Amino acid sequence: MTDILIIGGGTAGLTAGIYAARAGKSATILEKAATGGQIVYSPMVENYPGIPGISGAEYSERLTAQAEALGVAIEYDEAYAADRTADGFAVTGDMGTYEAKALILATGTVHRDLGATGEEELVGCGVSYCAVCDGAFYNDRAVAVVGGGNTALQDALFLAETCKSVAIVHRRDTFRGEAKLVKQLAARPNVRFVLNSTVTALHTEGGELSAITVKDTVTGNETELPVAGVFVAVGQLPQTDAFRTLTETDDAGYFVAGEDCTGTVPGVFVAGDCRAKEVRQLTTAAADGAIAALAACRYVDGL
């Protein structure tokens, strides 16, 4: 029996572990893959306060070491079920059952990918899922944004400030995002709309992205578009399935919890990208982790 069990070893989960340990509570993190989460694949993190430049991998290593040095236990196991018990919660994983007085869900999200040939191999070398994180690496270069919602349009506006050109590739003939954003983009001389189109292949030169193949969904014609980077904004998938019977989720599958990171069931707390919210960045994940951990500590203490 541990005081606080944390599901997920990304920034939110590791931060929660650090705050729980510093508050004198025993904390265990269950992580199904490698600690750090998606930021591990970012070649450079430049927007985290106080750390002007660090690779995602090194950032994750430091955060993991900090948590472990404080006594946080990290178990590399995939949790696939959780239940309430008389004493708290029992979480079932491939390696066994873990019991805790309080539970923090920091399960994160995964990016919906393009399904294009060569995509996985180019993550961090031309393929990005975060314009704010990686946009600075493409100053004065041609890039593409794939998607038609507000995230894609906002990413394109952000990139248009510094990139040589931005092509917005969308599978339909109209955007799902706000008309105001579309109007702003249409007024940018370095932005072009590539509508009724999908990305079918990614091409490399010297191990880095050099072009994408775009297929017209109406005519079937394919053209090659030279770009140094492609920013994928076709949605995220919250990793919440195993815990939806334990606490409430919204229509998109994100855990329902406010800024206090308190779930809809007593003793359950939510942190990071899996929480229903507007902004998903390292800083907001860390903030959620701290808030959720302190709330969990108060719950364990009966306050």
Image (spheres, rainbow, N blue to C red):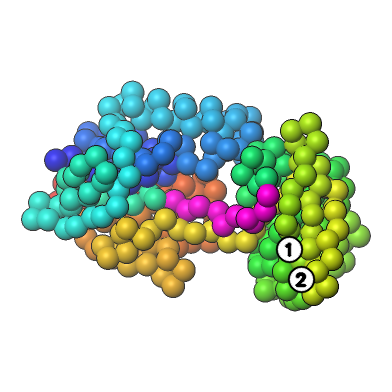
Q: What residue is shown with label 2?
A: 217
Q: Label 2: few (<14), some or many (≥20) within 10 Å?
A: some
Residue stretch rendered in magenta on the structure: 108-117
- For image coordinates 19% across by 57% down, the residue present is 83
Q: Residue at x 47, y 27 (%)?
A: 61
Residue 190 picture location, percent across and down = 89, 56
Instruction: Give percent across and percent down for residue 246.
Output: 26, 62
| Cα distance in 3D space between marks 2 and 1 | 7 Å
Determine crowd level at label 1: few under 14, some 14-19, many 20+ residues with C-alpha closer than 10 A: many
Q: Are marks 2 and 1 in contact (CB under 8 Å)?
A: yes
Picture quadrant where residue 239 is located: bottom left
- In the rendered view, tell whether residue 99 sits above or below residue 18: below
The image shows residue 151, relative to residue 217, as above or below, that is above
Q: Residue at x 41, y 70 (%)?
A: 250
Secondary element type, mark 2: loop
* Pointer 1 residue: 198
- Image-based side of 64 in relation to 139, left or right: left
Q: Main secondary structure of the magenta part?
A: loop
